[in-house]
Amino acid sequence: MTDEDSRARPATPLRARRWTGAGTPRRNGSSPYRLAFRLVGIPVLAVAGVIIYRGVREHLVLPACDSDTAKQTLTQVLKELKLEPTRYAPIKTISSSKDKVVCNAIMPLPDGGNVVADYSFYWQGSKATMRYSIHRQAAQSPAITPPSP
């Protein structure tokens, strides 16, 4: 054998060598860092994911009829029309799909009348838009009673 042949072949067969793989546990102090990452890092990543999802959600899903976003938008519209109901309930969902949400609300006014709001949310491009129809119902007069004698 030549000198080059002995360099090409290992001195001991592969099955007899000691295996030093990456899966063996290290004992040089990296374990506390892994533990710290698991205890702190994973919950921080989960909270960050939820915050990001909430920010992106309004661009992916139309608001529900009784959601805070829908109520704030309806409040702004009614203030522009100088109508301020005593409460914003009951709000009903007429129909709901991925592309359109149709709602109805009959809200009482301080003078005894009602505000009837029919509104819907739909996509206009990548932005959610609201279309509404609002009218006022006069207060119902009490039943006519004959004068007492």
Image (spheres, rainbow, N blue to C red):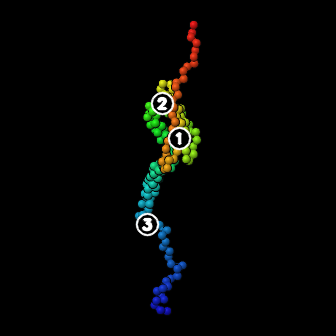
- Mark closest to the chain's N terminus, 3 or 1: 3
Which residue lies at the image location 45% right of the left edge and 54% below the top edge?
A: 45
Q: CA distance from mark 3 to mark 1?
A: 62 Å
Q: CA distance from mark 2 to mark 1?
A: 19 Å
Residue 145 visible? The answer is yes
Of discs 2 and 1, which sits in the foreground?
Answer: 1
Q: CA distance from mark 2 to mark 3?
A: 69 Å
Which residue lies at the image location 44% right of the left edge and 62% below the top edge?
A: 31
Checking the image for residue 149, the label placed there is none
Label 3 element class: loop
Residue located farthest toward the top when viewing the structure as drawn: 149
- Given the image, on which type of amino acid does mark 1 rest? Ser
The residue pinned by badge 2 equals 85
The residue pinned by badge 1 equals 120
The residue pinned by badge 3 equals 27
- Given the image, on which type of amino acid does mark 2 rest? Pro
